[in-house]
Amino acid sequence: MAYSSALLNVARMMERLESWKLALERLRASDTAEWAEAGRLVAEIIRMSTDATLRQAAEQALPVLRQAADNDDHGVTLAARRRIGVILDVVHDLTAPRFGRRNAAPKKLSSEDRARKMLGLPLAVQLTCEDINQAYRRAAKGMHPDQGGSAQAFIDLAAARDVLIHPGAHKDA
């Protein structure tokens, strides 16, 4: 019984998201948007949404939409359209179909893969020592303590280079 109740709640939320998406798309597409109506819609999203990101986007947009309703300034109108676009992007993300395993933990990277990422090298390509050293030099320019980087980041970069040059000498952490 609790499972069917949860499914019903999810279905209701998806219906709400779809109706909000249609209303937001209509507002964004119209040449003369009703900013008071947009403010009411965004207030409803703030009140009824269970997603924190959507609520945050709506809360940040509401003052701009209210200002656009009271003011005919072109800059305020552009800002209101951008805020509607941000909310619409969040709604699109929430309503997009999900493929694969949902909420699955990301795959743990091996120490060699972490080192490749740190040096900006591709994961599935055979590397020469020269490739590794060139990548190290490029990355070290920005991470060196004399260039504003941290000493620990520079040490980690050198360790990443060592992992790649001598792959059998290091165990996965």
Image (spheres, grey):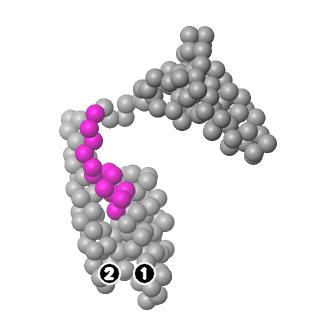
Is 48 on the left or on the right of 119, as rendered?
left
Assign a secondary structure to mark 2: loop
Q: Is residue 7 left or right of residue 61?
A: left
Front residue of 39 and 21: 21
Check the image and report above or below for 115 versus 72: above
Q: Position of residue 57 (x, y in %)?
A: 44, 61
Q: Are marks 2 and 1 in contact (CB under 8 Å)?
A: yes
Q: Looking at the magenta stretch, what is its main secondary structure?
A: helix
**Residue type, numbered disc 2:** Ala
Vertical relation: 17 (above or below) 126? below
Q: For marks 2 and 1, give the CA distance.
A: 9 Å
**The N terminus, quarter of image:** top left
Q: Residue at x 62, y 25 (%)?
A: 161
Q: Which residue is mark 1?
A: 77
Task: Compare marks 2 and 1 and give the one earlier in the sequence.
Answer: 2
**Magenta region includes residue 92:** yes
Task: Give the magenta range.
Answer: 88-100
Q: Residue at x 45, y 85 (%)?
A: 74
Pointer 1 local density, CA inside 10 Å: few below 14, some 14–19, many at least 20 = many
View extreme (bottom): residue: 72
The amino acid beneath tag 1 is Thr
* Residue closer to the observer: 157 or 48: 157
- Mark 2 sits on what residue? 33
Horizontal relation, residue 16 to residue 150: left or right: left
What residue occupies the far right of the structure in this picture? 146
